[in-house]
Amino acid sequence: MDMISRTGSGGALSSKAPLAFQADHIAELTRALHGLDGLVGHPVLMGGGGVGIEVERPKLVEVCRVLRDELGFEMLSSVSGVDMRDHLEVVYHMRSLAHNWLLQVKVKLEPGKPQVDSLVGIWITANWLERETYDLFGITFVGHPDLRRILLDDEFEGYPLLKSFHPTPTTVHDRATTQAAPEEALSGEAQRGVERVVSKRLGQGTLERLHPGTPTFGHAHYPEQPGVPESEGVD
Amino acid sequence: MAIDQENQQASEYIEGAEGFRSEEMILNMGPQHPSTHGVLRLVLTLDGETVVHCTPVIGYLHRGIEKILENRPYMGGIRYMDNCDYLSPMLNETAYVGAVEQLMGLEPPRRAQYIRLMTNEMQRITSHLVAIGTYLLDLGAMTPVLYCFRDREGILDLFEALGGSRFNVNYMRVGGVLHDFPKGWLNRLEQWCNKFDQSLKELEDLVTGNEIFEARTQGVGYIDPQQAVAYGLTGPNLRGSDVNFDLRVDRPYMAYREVSVNPAVRQEGDAFARFRVRLDECYESLRLIRVVMDTLPGGPISTRTPIALRPPRGETYFAVEGSKGEQGIYLISDGSEYPYRAKVRGPSFVNLQIVPELLRGHKMGDVVAILGSIDLVLGEVDR
């Protein structure tokens, strides 16, 4: 049949016991990692047959070069930033296809100084992954060839995945519209088709780009001097 | 004599043009272009017909799914995973619930695992059918896309009967699945399998040996194995470049620990190879569905889990073999009802990064042929 028991215990599934074919591999990986310079603490076993290590921030590039060249971690799977409130962390997940290893490398960043060395020189795929982390966390990757925002607008303010990021914008952006203020329209002052700059109270976390002429149902605000954006608290 | 003179003149003209470099032109492809399969924008720098440089611009579909996941209870986040890769929601949901289960040390019942495997393989077929159909449509073949979407409709109807919705099924649960099969569902699935068996061969006959298709895809967009690994490609794109890596085999999870999978691998590394891998995977998925139908264990479909889950403190990384590659979730729990951090590792985002490298030096006409062979879903690129 097509059924192959990989667990060796009569086909009973159990996620708690690591798979038989993985146990040797994990032991081999932890042995190989023990001699590594620049580790903080010891390698720990992660769920799902992975191994996690923490690396000193200044030695990240050296350690990663050893990981790629000597231990065979040729594929970088993901780069994630984590906001631990008092400091930021960058977590790398990498795979060795030849040995079938999965490794998690964690770096703690200095509080108040979100900077870490870029790994683009080691894994080319780190380029976009680091750009994404910069975009959402504001972590600067030193030595990155092209560190720009990737998912968000270039003009976007703030880093949305930080815990301090408020989902409702506190600043109001002005935008162009042809809509007339109700009182001006009644008194006949408004000219049709003239583009004006108005501010609108923004909804929950949205920075809508309204079509000129979209009704704002009384939420449009007209500053005294057209073109001068108001900072806050309009209605 | 006259012809010789004309040839002479023509060759002189070409010789004169050899050192000539025309002015480079910048062409915007997308975000509203049918062949970018979503809202991808490519800023192409062209020298004549040749692509000199390409800059992908993404983010038009960014919805902040990772931030949304942080602000929803664990069970509430499953529904948002549907919107990541909207062509394979079942696979995304499996990745998410698998990560939560791994964090909790929870083991779903065997029947639930087999149902997950079955729905995952069904979803893989639908995703590959869209990839194959639209790819052929991009290359000018109108009929295959109709065949593909017709067959895909059968699975979507089955999903509708199962979870209540065709696309955003919201079917997986932490600890199992939502419902057992409705009455007569397995018979319908078997009928669909028999029908699809024939129509898949029909589809293959339609494409195999087609000179135009082969001329446009063979030798185009070559990725060598080292490059594929360095760029972090996974899934059919990696296996099309002669790297036999499949998480269902190399890191088996859930019922894949008991059911053996034969991943499709091709040596060529070009667009045609990637296309063939997807087609072969449809056969393999069909076989797996039939295996599971024959050996479906009985028992409960879900463990008793509370709605308000509180996984213990900790972190975990769990990845499934999605239709486009490694669909990974990095999850951190602080012991509360909400995930502290949920990172979605989407395969399309990583796979897209190689596109500028592939397009460089190719003609403008090959851009669509290369882009389609990578099989991107922009919902997952932008998240």
Image (cartoon, coloured by chain):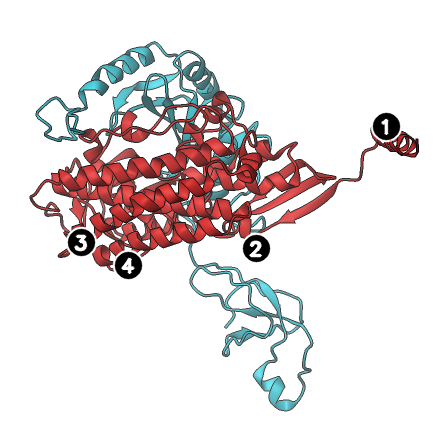
Spot occupied by residue B353 in the image (x, y as percentages of width and height): 52, 35
Q: Are marks 2 and 4 in contact (CB under 8 Å)?
A: no
Q: Amino acid at mark 2?
A: Gln
Residue picked out by circle 2: B32
Q: Is residue B342 above or below residue B20?
A: below
Report how far apart the C-alphas of labels 3 and 2 lie in the structure: 39 Å
Residue of label 4:
B165
Chain of residue at mark 4: B
Tell if the residue under mark 4 belongs to the same chain as the one under mark 1: yes
Residue B265 visible somewhere in the drawing: yes
Q: Which residue is mark 1?
A: B15
Amino acid tagged 3: Trp
In primary-sequence order, the first of circles 4 and 1 is 1
Query: Are labels 3 and 2 on one chain?
Result: yes
Q: Residue at x 28, y 59 (%)?
A: B165
Crowding at mark 3 (Cα within 10 Å: few <14, some 14-19, many 20+): some
Name the kind of residue labelled 1 in the image.
Glu
* CA–CA distance in space, label 2 to label 1: 40 Å
Q: Which residue is under mark 3?
A: B185
Of the residues under marks 1 and 3, which one precedes in the sequence?
Answer: 1
Quadrant of residue B9 within the rendered picture: top right
Q: Is disc 1 in the same subunit as disc 3?
A: yes
Tell me the mark number nearer the camera, choosing from 3 and 4. Answer: 3
**Chain letter, colour cyan:** A
SS class of the residue under badge 2? loop
